[in-house]
Image (tube, rainbow, N blue to C red):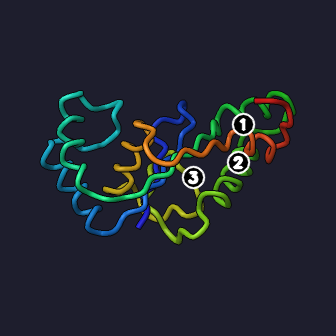
Amino acid sequence: MFGIAMPDWRDGVIAVVKADESVRDAVAHVMSSCGVSTLNTAELPRYKLSCIEILLKKYKYESIIYITDIYGIVNRVALKSGVGRSALFEAAWAYLSRHICGGIDAAECDGETKLSCCGSSCGALCELAKLEANMRRGVVVDLTRKLAEALGVSQHI
């Protein structure tokens, strides 16, 4: 099972979490136990984050953090080339989908994430992905340069 989140588009970060059903259930229980409705650290008081961290420590899951700056790159290309932003966003999300969604049939995703593998709305694993994105935990993959090149920007970024 997968959760995918981009908690704040300004950060240019997409997190993918892979976990089994027991972790999904545990995350929902942790959120309830800590009295939170989201794991987006930008919206949590520090003492709640401490509660979450302690309770999640015993669970195993994998995280990949993709650095993309999709909005910055699309805006730069649109201004430079005169191409409409909507077409560029479509191309950018298609590129990211090919790269990120390989082997993922369906994932829980937040509203900011427009990947082809997004099948259901943000649930517990998606919330966990928000936490991982904000904490930058897991394997970090910088796709900024490759995304820029895919959209026709060859200069150094």
Q: What residue type is labelled 2?
A: Ala
Q: Compared to 98, does 133 lie above or below?
A: above
Give the spatial CA distance, label 1 vs label 2.
8 Å
x then y, percent, for residue 146: 75, 45
> Residue at image x 50%, y 51%?
64
**Kind of residue at badge 3:** Lys
* Cα–Cα span, label 1 and label 3: 14 Å
Residue 134, picture quadrant:
top left
Circle 3 crowding by C-alpha within 10 Å: few under 14, some 14–19, many from 20 = some
45 or 55: which is nearer to us? 55
In the rendered structure, find residue 74 and report the number of the disc placed on it. Answer: 1
Q: Mark 2 points at which residue?
A: 92
Q: Classify the position of the N terminus by image quarter.
A: bottom left
Which secondary structure, mark 2? Answer: helix
Left or right of residue 63: residue 70 = right
Question: What's the amino acid at mark 1?
Answer: Val
Question: Which circle marks residue 23 in the picture?
Answer: none
Q: Mark 3 points at which residue?
A: 114
Label 1 or label 2, whichever comes before in sequence order = 1
Q: Do the residues labelled 1 and 2 touch (CB within 8 Å)?
A: yes
Residue drawn at x 53%, y 32% is: 11
**In the figure, is residue 41 to the left or right of 50?**
right
